[in-house]
Amino acid sequence: MTKTWQDSLKTALKGNNQNAMRAHADFSPQAGQLFAPVVTSSVNKQINWLDDQDPLLLQFLPHVDELTEAADFHSDPVGDHLSTVVPGLIHKYHGRVLLIASGSCAVNCRYCFRRHFPYGQSYAPRNHWQAAIEYIKQHQEIHEVILSGGDPLTLSDKTLKSLTDQLLTIQQVKTLRIHSRIPTVLPTRIGNSFAIWSESFGLNKVMVLHVNHSNELSNDAIKAIQKLKSLGFTLLNQSVLLKNVNDSAAVLIELSHHLFKHGVLPYYLHLFDKVQNASHFDLPESHAIEIYQQMKKHLPGYLLPRLVREEAGEPSKSLINIK
Ligand code: SF4
């Protein structure tokens, strides 16, 4: 019998794909208790387990360095709590709101800035999205709704439809944006049922993918991206600059070209958000700027992601000034 995306997700969440991980020298069971190791079989296939420095392995391995508590690193590095207006709804930027649509992901990225987020208290789909919908109705300036999480595509298409049906009744809402890593880590999710849902509403559709390295673009991931394109999604990508994973201009230049080949525009390159237990991914801002200057020399403007830092309490992301 063919495995559904739900079966694959359940397997990932149960940790059944992690035997190779446990055998790795830097694997720390204590780090795995702080933040559960979760990977899909698609990601498993893309990892080179014989290479200690494999860029995918480093993103998903519960690493002994996570046990280090570093000064200046925090559980809520971007100030989500300061901007939460009703449970599961963050209103930080003018004209748009962000829904914490799900507390789960198909993978647990070790550097996740929400790795300490109390998803149990912040869950927008509760009561059929009622609190979020009421808030949006009362704020005429909100024209864009962003689904984030966790990963919003861990929700069923039925749950997503219950949201879009209600958004369609709010005149000022024009755009639905989805932030998701799922098209590349669980590509089977972008199947027929998803297509039926996404064709059922007339909002502008934007999908912001999360790809940090070209090795993540498997053949199946590329098929999922092509499917999203055919469904009318504008496709953008955000990456996080991570020590030992993609801290090289050559790697990021290759990624921009690779994404563009498949119809995805590089959007943001985030400086690492200083989340506690992940300080080993951080690199000095001066080094990030050197990398970015190299990228700027080699890429046309439309393939150069914006180098940004998110700061708690600021009304927008801060662009890093580069000469
Ligand atoms: S997919 Fe996104 S939200 Fe989920 S663990 Fe990774 S970085 Fe965090």
Image (spheres, rainbow, N blue to C red):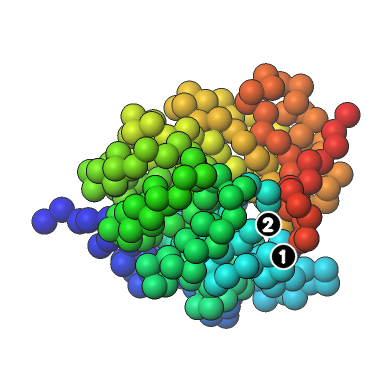
For the point 76% across and 34% down, the residue is: 292
- For the residue pair 304 and 27, the one nearer the viewer reads as 304
Q: Quadrant of residue 226?
A: top left
As drawn, the label of residue 7 is none
Residue 311: x and y in percent read 77, 56
Q: Quadrant of residue 58?
A: bottom right
For the point 71% across and 68% down, the residue is: 82
Secondary structure type for disc 1:
loop
Quarter of the rendering occupied by the N terminus: bottom left
Of tags 2 and 1, the one toward the viewer is 2
Instruction: Check disc 1 and give the amino acid type.
Output: Gly
Q: Residue furthest left?
A: 1
- For the residue pair 116 and 101, the one nearer the viewer reads as 101
For the point 73% across and 74% down, the residue is: 68
Residue 117: x and y in percent read 59, 72
Report if residue 38 is visible in the image. Answer: no
Question: Disc 2 vs disc 1: Cβ atoms closer than 8 Å?
Answer: yes
Q: Which residue is mark 1?
A: 79
Q: Which residue is mark 2?
A: 92
First in residue order: circle 2 vs circle 1? 1
Residue 194: x and y in percent read 29, 47
Report if residue 302 is visible in the image. Answer: yes
Instruction: Check disc 2 and give the amino acid type.
Output: Lys
